[in-house]
Each structure stands twice: as structure tokens, then as C-alpha cells.
Image (cartoon, grey):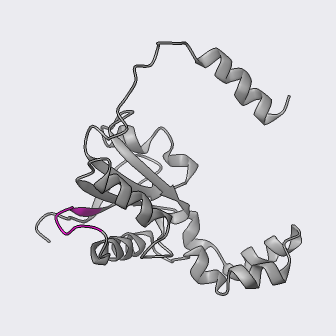
């Protein structure tokens, strides 16, 4: 049985018509969270914050990084969340021991080449691999940088507090990096 077969079989057992009440597209807590895609955060970060299904919009990418600070996918998601879905606060959450803190652009390029991606395709689409990956050395500094990038974005209103937190994927504690109140 393939992984996809396992998922579809489990889904048939999971779904029960009427068992899950419909939820609004708008988050109950008027909150958007921008965090990392790390698997250690799944079913751990939201409960550590006291959040449940439907409470917040969750936006994830590798290392909670912003590569295009003006019109990239993260910005687009936050603009829609604020103006269309009623989000009133944003929290950027990085985490300790983030894999993106050790990604090597040249090493990633070599792995792509070994899997059949041509150098021409890489060079055409990704002129600066290290910048594109969004590599950083310290998760805390990355959170500080991303919070600042969001605060300076002219598409996001100044009345939306943007906070920064650092999460521990081992024990679940949160550390305040930046408060968006009174900025």
C-alpha cells in the first residue's frame, strides 16, 4: 500500500457526515500566525497557544521567512486575512533548532542538480540561491527581521499589531521576541 493509499483509507474511516460543524472562513480570534513548516509544530504549536480549529489563520513556509517583502505569497495571504477575513493581529513565530538556520545554498543547488534539475533552470529562476532559500543563522534574529519587514510593508495597515515569538519544539514554551502593542 502506498502512502497515498494509506491516507485515503484513513480518510474514509475519519469522515462522518455532520460530525464536524461548519466553521466560518474568518478566524474566531481575528488572528493570523506566520510560522515555519517544521513537522514538530503540527498539533503542538496551536495547543501550546490555547488555539483550536477555526481560531486563527495559519500561514507556513520554510523557516517563516519572507523572500518577496512586497507581493509574495505570505504578504498576499496576510492582506487577504486582514481585509477580507477580519484579522486584527499577526504573530510571527520562529522556533529553536530551525533547519533553515543551517541550509546551505550551494549544497541545496547540488542536491537539485543530482535529482535532474538543470543548472540552466536553476540559474534562470533562482539567481541567488542563498537569498531565495532565505537562510539565516539565528531563529530569533529571523523573527525580528520578519516582524520588521511586515511592519514596514505599505500594504499592511499600521493599526494591526505584529508580534514576534520564539517557540521551543521540545517542550512547547513561547518566548516573546517583539510586542506589536504601542509600536
Query: Which residue is pictured at 44% across the width and 69% down the height?
Result: 139
Which quadrant of the structure image shows residue 112? bottom right
Residue closest to the eye, 37 or 25? 25
- Residue 167 in view: no
- Residue 106 in view: yes
Is 98 included in the stretch rendered in magenta?
Answer: no
Q: Which residues are magenta?
A: 156-163
Q: What quarter of the picture does the C terminus occupy?
A: bottom left
Residue closest to the eye, 45 or 151? 151
Residue 74 x/y as whole percent: 45, 63
The image shows residue 11, relative to residue 95, as above or below, that is above
Judged from this view, the residue extending furthest toward the front is 84
Query: Which residue is pictured at 66% across the width and 78% down the height?
Result: 104
Query: Which residue is pictured at 43% across the width and 76% down the height?
Result: 69
Q: Main secondary structure of the magenta part?
A: loop
Residue 140 x/y as whole percent: 38, 70
Residue 80 x/y as whole percent: 37, 55
Residue 20 x/y as whole percent: 44, 19
Query: Which residue is pictured at 32% across the width and 75% down the height?
Result: 153
Query: Is residue 115 found left or right of 168 in the rendered image?
Result: right
Amino acid at each position: 500500500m502506498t502512502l497515498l493509499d494509506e491516507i485515503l483509507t484513513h480518510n474514509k474511516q475519519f469522515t462522518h457526515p455532520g460530525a464536524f460543524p461548519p466553521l466560518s472562513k474568518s478566524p474566531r480570534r481575528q488572528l493570523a500566525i506566520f510560522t515555519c513548516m517544521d513537522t514538530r509544530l503540527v498539533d503542538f504549536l496551536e495547543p501550546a497557544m490555547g488555539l483550536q480549529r477555526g481560531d486563527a489563520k495559519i500561514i507556513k513556509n520554510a523557516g517563516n521567512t519572507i523572500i518577496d517583502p512586497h507581493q509574495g505569497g505570505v504578504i498576499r495571504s496576510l492582506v487577504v486575512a486582514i481585509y477580507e477575513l477580519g484579522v486584527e493581529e499577526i504573530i510571527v513565530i520562529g522556533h529553536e533548532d530551525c533547519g533553515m538556520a543551517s541550509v546551505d545554498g550551494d549544497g541545496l543547488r547540488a542536491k537539485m542538480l543530482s535529482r535532474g534539475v538543470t543548472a540552466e533552470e536553476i540559474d534562470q529562476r533562482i539567481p541567488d540561491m542563498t537569498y531565495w532559500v532565505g537562510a539565516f543563522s539565528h531563529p530569533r534574529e529571523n523573527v525580528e527581521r520578519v516582524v520588521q519587514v511586515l511592519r514596514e510593508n505599505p500594504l499592511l495597515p499600521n493599526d494591526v499589531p505584529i508580534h514576534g515569538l520564539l517557540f521551543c519544539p521540545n517542550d512547547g514554551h513561547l518566548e516573546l521576541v517583539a510586542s506589536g502593542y504601542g509600536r
